[in-house]
Amino acid sequence: MNTPDNKITVPVPVQGTPEATGQLDDLLALMARLRRDCPWDQKQTNHSLIPYAIEEAYELGEAVQGDDDEDIKGELGDVLLQVVFHCQMYAEQGRFDMNDVITTLQEKLIRRHPHVFEAETLTDDAAVKVRWDEIKAEEQQTREARGKPKRRLDNTKAGSALMQAQDVQKQASKLGFDWEGVSGAFDKLDEEIAELKHELTDNSTTAVGYDISKANIREIEKELGDCMFALVNVARKLNLDAETATLTCVHKFKSRFGYIEEQLALASKQLEDSDLTGMEALWEQAKQHERSS
């Protein structure tokens, strides 16, 4: 935590077996202990935690929808863990700590609510939104003064990778960076898939496919990302939402796999007792069941 002379101090790890006290300082000390003694926690970086932060935010949303207090408390705790984890690592790097994060948040909330903390009078939520946007514009000017210029695609909506991909393409399209029809998007998708296959072909192949153990994983990751970005573009050109389409597919997959599990249970079997051929046959039955229902 910060000391009066504003030096950043990494939290001291808790000793022995800690108790759950509900106090923030004790949580920070617990996180420091995990970073010191847990191999998995030691291995993490701020970048490696990004998928977990996104996942926890989605799980919190599901918990709120479910309206179960225990689930909500658990998921709020998981979101808080991400904040504490990041703060611990940034403190280790000597950049900032939890005090700085909380102070920055407090300053922002006070600054963005002049109708609460100052003499301004705003009569409804619409007026609050207008003033909020004005203050954000002033904050952007401050960022630009710090050497952080605003670029045309900086307003991309936060969200999943699919949501961001579709929105950034939409913004670029408004600026004239787009194909006229869907055919160009399909051509780009074919091009990106070919590049991914080429990257894989450059590596050894086995009887069952590609041997990625010898591959340049980062390059394959980039090419795979290009393919997914291009497919999102196809969805956009078809006026479809890529996130919704993917979630529909996930729901369909889970439903069909659940059908397989149910049918195996009726035969007194478990998934582990079945082979791929048997599961594929049940998969086709699940598809037929969908069509008839």
Image: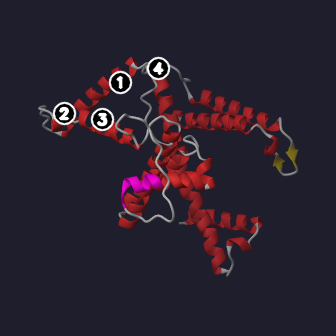
Question: Please, is residue 65 above or below residue 130 in the view?
Answer: below
Q: Viewed as shown, does residue 121 lie left or right of 280? A: left
Question: Which residue is depicted at the point 44% across and 52% down?
Answer: 28
CA separation in Å, label 2 and label 3? 11 Å
Residue at disc 1, secondary structure: helix
Disc 2 crowd, CA 10 A, few/some/many (<14, 14-19, 20+): some
Task: Give the prevailing secondary structure in the magenta stretch.
Answer: helix
> Which of the 4 image quarters holds residue 181?
top right
Instruction: Mark 2 or mark 3: name the one nearer the start of the chain.
Output: 3
The circle drawn on residue 140 is 1
CA separation in Å, label 4 and label 3? 32 Å
Instruction: Mark 1 or mark 3: name the one nearer the start of the chain.
Output: 3
Q: Amino acid at mark 3?
A: Lys
Q: Amino acid at mark 4?
A: Leu
Please tell me which residue lies in front, 293 or 44: 44
Q: Assess whether mark 3 and mark 2 are in contact (beta carbons under 8 angstroms).
A: no
Q: Assess whether mark 3 and mark 1 are in contact (beta carbons under 8 angstroms).
A: no
